[in-house]
Image (cartoon, grey):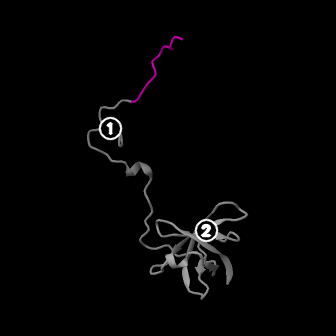
Amino acid sequence: MKKLGTVKNIIHDGSILLQALESPLPGTRVCDMRGAEVGRITRVFGPVAAPYISVRPKLGIETVGLLGSTLYAGSEEQPKQSRSVKAYAPREQHRRFRPGSGEPGKKKGVNTWQRKGKPRKK
């Protein structure tokens, strides 16, 4: 296993923040010193010389106990996409349409601003 970095913080959504020695690929497995999988890398960000890594932990992992510990990189395989993830429709289809209001997403009785034909005097 390859040394990945040190755990610096636990983010409010439960993600683990590491200060890495080099930038690995997203989707790489992250393991502790015993070889047990902790989670997978979701995001690599920050300066190129010393990047930061966001790791989404597996269910049942006590993340607070990992503060200050060293984590290691496992295999670089992409996680499988779950079946519950749906493809989203284009933005126009998400707008609310009320019958009789004209265009979808436009409030009734609201006109758009238009400039008058003659220029302003200075």
Q: Quadrant of residue 103?
A: top left
Extreme-bottom residue of the structure: 34
Magenta stretch, main secondary structure, is loop
When the figure is inspected, residue 78 is found, relative to residue 91, above or below; the finding is below
Picture coordinates of residue 85, whole percent (x, y): 44, 68
Picture coordinates of residue 63, whole percent (x, y): 50, 76
Identify the residue shown where x is 56% and y is 75%: 67
Task: Name the residue type under label 2.
Answer: Ile
Task: Name the residue type under label 1.
Answer: Lys
Taking the magenta stretch, the answer to whether it contains residue 120 is: yes
Disc on res. 53? 2
Q: Which residue is label 1 attached to? A: 107
When the figure is inspected, residue 73 is found, relative to residue 42, above or below; the finding is below
* Cα–Cα gap, marks 2 and 1: 44 Å
Identify the residue shown where x is 50% and y is 75%: 64
Q: Which residues are magenta?
A: 112-122
Extreme-left residue of the structure: 100
